[in-house]
Image: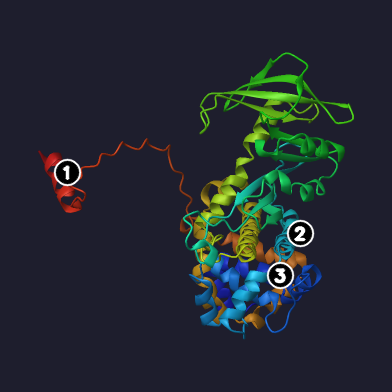
Amino acid sequence: MLLGQVFERFATKTPFAVMSRSLLERTLTPEALNALFDNKADSQYTRELTFSSVVDLMGLVVTSAFPSVRAAYLDKSCDIAVSLTSLYNKLQGIEPDVSAELVQHTAQQLLPLIQHCGGALPEPVAGYEMNVLDGNNIAATEHRLKETRTNSAAPLPGKSLCVFRPAYQLVTHVVPCEDGHTQERALVDPILKLVTKDSLWVADRNFCFQRFLLGIAKQLGFFVIREHASLNYKLSGKLRRRGQSETGEIFQQASVIEDEEGKKHRFRRIVVKLKKATEDGDWELAILTNLPRSVSAVEVSEAYRKRWTIEGGFQDLTTTLACEINTLCYPRAALFVFCVALLAYNLQSAIKGVMRSEHGAEKVENELSRYFVAGEIGQVYRGMMVALPPEEWVVVRDMGLNDYIAFLKRLARAVDFERYPKTRRGPKKAKPKRHYDPKHPHVSVAKLLFARNVKETS
């Protein structure tokens, strides 16, 4: 399908910005977003400011196209005719269920697209759809609320549980909570409703408690969860060596949990004796699983190790997307922004899926930087939408799926990887101990450099 010369120029010079906008055009149309809001919102309603306009504006903020909500509002790039105060009031009232549905809707649209183009990664444990569960605390905000101004404690605007699919690099579900001090264990009921037969759930020890483990097993799902010292269970076998992985020696023993009705549930306890201690100083970690014995103890330990993928995802959200805006002190506003950032992260994951289908997983995962991809999208988007207004993108929305994927693959083939290099840092160096001299609280950098040059040349 032919595109205009200006469109082609952007497609050639800034392929990721074009991919991102085209994905938005197909997966998050204003009609779909407004219908989502109407179906999920209980107390809020649409008068003059539509939900789709708010999502568009906050998308520009989290991708750093604008430095703040106010800057994006004053630019008038989005169709917002209400006052800035009304916009903030709208943000403060968006219900957590609406924010959560926004993330789920995006993932549901993008996952089959990644499948269809052949960009999915292999499941970490063959034959099981792996889901990684982790909690995220939203960073403290400024002391803007009257109640927080005289208190030095950091105001926490909320937290969430996120479900991540490593094979697709997508955050598929989020459970937002307005109370930043809520225990993660109190939020797992919606997660248990997501468990399906043969699905695999991987999580850290915060989620190692009887109700959650047995809840997964009851739904015929499987778990790989790090042991928590408070779990009440009994060992029923000797610890036997089962092999070795990159991180250390692997051992296994049989264990039993007895439920409230006295029924016994058997599972395996995998112990990894580490080559290098964890950040907490642990030289061993124990993992509990109900996976069948056909999945080896080494495979179980590797599945748990790969849960760090979601930690990397949270790091990307912090470094490449503005997922936490510390001026938005109201919990619902902060949670909504976090979910919009998850939406943007999922769009990037879909782009990486297309890239994998053309260049291979190893090249994309090792050489393509999310940071520079996000940078292109944020820097180019505003100018692109001036040169290519919404009506220019209708052609993308009207494409059949096969034609659209061919369009994305054409963009992917033209990507110059040298423009988006991924840097692999070496091991961290130990920080030297600093000393403080009250007689010399400041130093001149020029004098330090002069002293270095004298030393090097002498």
Q: Is residue 458 above or below residue 103?
A: above
Real-space Cα separation, disc 3 to disc 1, in angstroms:
57 Å
Task: Between residue 291 and residue 386, name the one nearer to us.
Answer: 291
Name the residue type under label 2.
Answer: Gln
Instruction: Decide if residue 366 is on the left or right side of residue 433.
Output: right
Task: Between residue 245 and residue 132, name the one nearer to us.
Answer: 132
Real-space Cα separation, disc 1 to disc 2, in angstroms:
58 Å
Q: Residues within 10 Å of mark 2 (few under 14, many from 20)?
A: some
Which residue is identified by label 2? 108
Residue depicted at x 62% and y 53%? 180
Which residue is identified by label 1? 452
Task: Work out whether residue 61 can be spotted.
Answer: yes
Which residue is identified by label 3? 28
Q: Which image quarter: residue 79?
A: bottom right
Q: Is residue 74 above or below residue 340?
A: below
Task: Between residue 78 and residue 380, name the one nearer to us.
Answer: 78
Q: How many discs mark residues in the rendered view?
A: 3
Name the residue type under label 3.
Answer: Leu
